[in-house]
Image (cartoon, grey):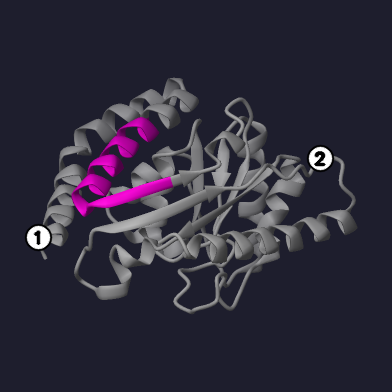
Amino acid sequence: MIRFLLAITWTVLFLILSIPVIIVEWIIGFFAPKAKAVSSQWIVTNAFRVLIFLAGTKLTIIGKENVPPDRPVLYVPNHRSIFDIIITYTLVPRQTGYVAKKETKRVPIFSIWMAFMNCLFLDRTDLRDGLRVINKVAELIKNGSSICIFPEGTRNKTADPLGEHFHDGSLKIAEKAQCPIIPVSINNSDDIFEAHLPKVKKTHVIIEYGKPIETQGLSHLKFREVCSEVQTILTDTYLKNKEMV
């Protein structure tokens, strides 16, 4: 329980102490929105690094060189833990927003930081809202921000590497933005917290970044093949790295 108490204490302290900084970032956003996104991400990323340390999480990172540092991409990870966001945010080489479920917007203060970092909130039950978010995210990518989306829609609690639902529609972002897709396989992140609530456990997490999958100029039929390829890569990589945990 000590790690849990440390993690909760640090999270609460950060959220409270960051309120004056939020005001400063809000003012910056009036004059330089991109600068606000970058500086906000730097602040939150460093808070996440402390949280990872307090949780006792050891990271093995494979394929980081596959992520192009000079162009925006669409990250497509599997999803088993809230720590998937915390960990992967500390590894991105450029400004990156996440697509989160609308319930996340209810989290006080943190939802403000998410909005500052070009994160968007999706209502999974509203198709019209889904199209709006896809179009908005595509615009963010065209303007230089990478985006991370979890196609499973929510945390996977099954033995299946990708759970019961993999929403191909979320990958349409890459088709609209004409950007590369980076499959991201995450192993064992649920063993930090979700597998034994409320205990936070010292855990070895393996993250592997796949090679970029280009989408520029693809026909709709070819893009459907890309969606299937992403699922295959994530499944195969997850099962391969499961042996390393």
Residue 49 on the magenta span = yes
Q: Is residue 209 above or below residue 105?
A: above
Instruction: Name the residue furthest top.
Output: 31
Q: Nearer the viewer, mark 2 or mark 1?
A: 1
Query: What segment is highlighted magenta in the picture?
Result: 40-60
SS at badge 2: loop
Residue 171 part of the magenta-drawn span: no
Which quadrant would residue 117 be assigned to in this image?
top left
Left or right of 137 on screen, residue 64: left
Q: Which quadrant holds the N terminus?
A: bottom left
Residue 144 visible in rendering: yes
Residue at 44% across, 20% down: 31
Q: Earlier in the sequence, mark 2 or mark 1?
A: 1
Disc 1 marks a residue whose amino acid type is: Ile
Alpha-carbon neighbours of circle 2 within 10 Å: few (<14), some, or many (≥20)?
Answer: some
Quick one: 159 or 99, which is closer to the camera? Answer: 159
Q: Quadrant of the C terminus?
A: bottom left
C-alpha gap between disc 2 and disc 1: 49 Å
Query: Quick check: 8 left or right of 130?
Result: left
Q: Give the amino acid at mark 2.
A: Gln
Could you tell whether 72 is left or right of 40 in the image?
A: right
Q: Position of residue 142 (x, y in %)?
A: 67, 34
Where residue 146 sits, quadrant-wise, is: top right
Mark 1, other Cα within 10 Å: few <14 / some 14–19 / many ≥20 = few
- Frontmost residue, 123 versus 52: 52
Which secondary structure class fits the magenta region best? helix
Residue at image point 15% right, 39% down = 17
Q: Position of residue 41 (x, y in %)?
A: 39, 35
Which residue is identified by label 1? 2
Label 2, on which residue?
A: 216
